[in-house]
Image: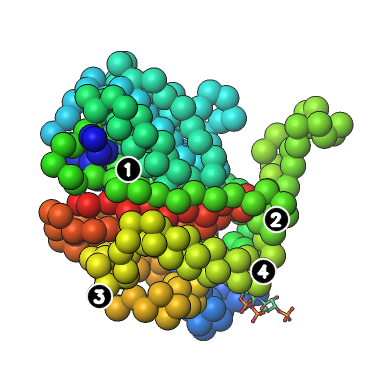
Amino acid sequence: MSKALILGTGSCLPQKTLTNAELEQIVDTSDQWITSRTGIKTRRISGEGEENFRLATLAGQRALEMAGLSPLALDMIIVATLSPHKIMPSTACFVQAELGATNAFAYDINAACTGFTYGLDLASKYIQSQPEMKVLVIGSETLSTRVDWKDRNTCVLFGDGAGAAVLGGSEDGRGVLGSKLHSDGRLWNLLHMDGPESQNPELQGSDWEGALIRMNGSDIFKQAVRAMDDVVVELLEQQQLTIEDIDLVIPHQANIRILNKLQQRLNIPDDKLFINVDKYGNTSAASIPIALDEANKQGRVKENDLVLLCTFGAGLTWASLLMRW
Ligand SMILES: CC(C)(COP(=O)(O)OP(=O)(O)OC[C@H]1O[C@@H](n2cnc3c(N)ncnc32)[C@H](O)[C@@H]1OP(=O)(O)O)[C@@H](O)C(=O)NCCC(=O)NCCS
């Protein structure tokens, strides 16, 4: 059976870097606290001309260039985001227009930090049944527009950026081998955005202002470690593999302490775990595709390598996906 193979990757980070020292001027925090609790040193913040869809488009363009494909070759564009350019139309439609990908249908998905991995899974299922399809999957966020810059519990954690992958059919055994996806909506309130809600009587006249990220940090921490550990074990068992068989693990870049705990629990050697959370913070749906693009460009993934993605986010949602590069 055909498999969905990544043909090219790309990413786009905003120009502006926000350091921990600069955050000290905004909220009551310190470089020492942020570094020791999260591992984050800098994050990127989008500015003028760096709307979500523009970052997404550039990441997509770069992925297409690497794949040697014209935008006209695309059949489908999926943008995973929790900070869309507008609620309607989808950010994916803006990207489709910017790219001139007039043969592609386009829509967004929102699975928070798990969105890109859900998107890859979706693309993979399309390509399995229609191997001639070319699909662009993008994770793109401008979380700086959704963060409460007065809340030191959250504003130090997040950053902006976009990453992308173009997929097409492969017959040589390479591509997506399997995935495990989960959600638990009962725990939505651990990590969410305040209104506006769908039946909020005060919605009239309100806008995005006030729709900001709220989080129960310690509960999210525990859930993230347990969920990512479980979902990796589940996928490895399904694939009859062990962690020693994996060449590179690319986890969601939320927090270095979550990654360290995951590494201990799964026994992942240092050189098989990709980490860039220090540079970009948590970019939600963009985190895995940015990391994937960096890993690719740094030569950390070679043809036929087994690459394992694992992620966790609001919803709650969590997932793992295995591919042969
Ligand atoms: C948020 C997080 C870093 C907090 O770390 P922690 O070890 O749980 O924090 P602690 O319980 O040790 O400390 C909390 C204290 O630090 C304070 N604090 C919170 N943010 C702070 C900051 N940026 N600077 C300084 N102090 C801060 C709190 O106000 C609290 O103070 P108090 O005890 O006086 O009330 C941690 O819970 C975490 O990483 N959670 C997961 C977050 C995440 O990854 N979310 C996205 C998942 S996709």
Q: Residue 99, relative to residue 229: is it above or below?
A: above
Query: Residue beneath label 4, please?
Result: 219
Query: Which of pointers 3 and 1 lies earlier in the amino acid sequence?
Result: 1
Q: Are marks 4 and 2 in contact (CB under 8 Å)?
A: no
Residue matched to label 1: 164
How far is the residue under mark 3 from the one under mark 2? Answer: 34 Å
Disc 1 versus disc 2: nearer the observer = 2
Mark 1 vs mark 2, CA separation in Å: 29 Å
Mark 3 lies on a secondary structure that is: helix
Q: Residues within 10 Å of mark 3 (few under 14, many from 20)?
A: few
Instruction: Write down the quadrant of residue 41 in the picture.
Output: bottom left
Q: Secondary structure at mark 4?
A: helix
Is 220 drawn above or below residue 101 in the view shown?
below
**x and y percentages locating residue 165 in the rendered image:** 29, 42
In the rendered structure, the answer to whether residue 12 lies left or right of residue 202 reads left
Q: Position of residue 123 (x, y in %)?
A: 36, 35
The residue indicated by pointer 2 is 187
Q: Earlier in the sequence, mark 1 or mark 4?
A: 1
Given residues 133 and 92, the one toward you in this image is 133
Label 4 crowding class (10 Å Cα cut-off): few <14, some 14-19, many 20+? few
Three-letter code, disc 1? Ala
Asked whether residue 16 is in view, the answer is no
The residue shown at (42%, 80%) is 264
User: Residue placed at 37% from the left, 62% from the top?
Assistant: 236
Q: Amino acid at mark 3?
A: Asp
Quadrant assignment for ligand 1? bottom right
Residue 131 visible within the image: yes
Q: Can you identify the residue that label 3 sits on?
A: 271
In three-dimensional space, the C-alpha distance between marks 3 and 1, rounded to whole angstroms, equals 24 Å
Are the residues flagged by discs 3 and 2 in contact, CB closer than 8 Å?
Answer: no
